[in-house]
Structure formats: structure tokens, C-alpha cells
Image: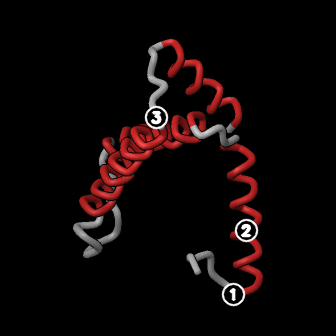
Amino acid sequence: MNEWQREVADFMRRHNLLHDPATHALDLVSEVGEAAKEVLLATDYGQRPAQFRPEMADELGDALYSLLSLAEICGVDAGSALDAALRKYGRRLAERGGTGSE
């Protein structure tokens, strides 16, 4: 993950894409929405097993880029944040049997 974040940070600097956190947050929300739309289309809104289109990979790539851009602009190490999240979800699984939000 750290390598991915460095790669995104270098891309952002090269192309002058360092914006305020709100801009990156809005971009992330938009991209996650597009990925969710692909899931809904792939499942006919939950009516059948998923049949993903090639666009799903594109949308997930866009969402990942947006997430790593937001992490970079906020000064968050995405790898460390992911490690902490996995520990948190591991504790929730052990304590409650699920990973959902509280």
C-alpha cells in the first residue's frame, strides 16, 4: 500500500493535482458511488448473483486512486491506516462475530 500511495502522490505532484481535502473527499464519494452503481447493475439490484462487467475494475481503480489521493493530501499513511482497520475488524470478529459499524 505504501508503494501505491507514493505512486499516486508522485502522479498528483507531476500533474498539479494537489487540491484541498474537501475536493478529494467529494471525488472519493463520487467514485465509490460509481462502484456501488456497478454492483447494483451486476446484481440487478440484489435480485440475482453478481455478473460484473469490465467497468467494475475501472470503477474500483478510480475509487482506489481517489482514496489514496485523499490519504496523501490529509497526511495519512494509507498502509498504516489499513493495518489499524484490519486489527479493529479482527477484534470485532472475535468479540461480536461481525465487522459492521457500531
Q: Quadrant of residue 58?
A: top left
10 sits left or right of 95 in the view: left
Mark 2–mark 3 contact, CB under 8 Å?
no
Q: Amino acid at mark 2?
A: Lys
Q: Looking at the rendering, in which quadrant would you find the N terminus? A: top right
The residue that appears at 56% across and 27% down in the rendered structure is 8
Q: Is residue 60 visible?
A: no
Q: Is residue 79 above or below residue 73?
A: below
Which residue lies under the disc numbered 2?
88
Which residue lies under the disc numbered 3?
20
Choose between 71 and 4: the one closer to the eye.
71
Q: Determine whether the residue tagged by mark 2 lies in a helix, strand or loop.
A: helix
The residue that appears at 34% across and 58% down in the rendered structure is 36
Q: Determine whether the residue tagged by mark 3 lies in a helix, strand or loop.
A: loop
- Residue 74 x %, y %: 59, 40
In three-dimensional space, the C-alpha distance between marks 1 and 2, rounded to whole angstroms, equals: 12 Å
Which residue lies under the disc numbered 1?
96
Q: Looking at the rendering, in which quadrant would you find the C terminus? A: bottom right
- Residue 48 x %, y %: 28, 72
Q: Amino acid at mark 3?
A: Asp
- Residue 94 x %, y %: 76, 81
Q: Residues within 10 Å of mark 3 (few under 14, many from 20)?
A: few
Of labels 1 and 2, earlier in sequence is: 2
Q: Residues within 10 Å of mark 2 (few under 14, many from 20)?
A: few
Mark 1–mark 3 contact, CB under 8 Å?
no
The residue that appears at 55% across and 38% down in the rendered structure is 68
Q: Nearer the viewer, mark 1 or mark 3?
A: 3
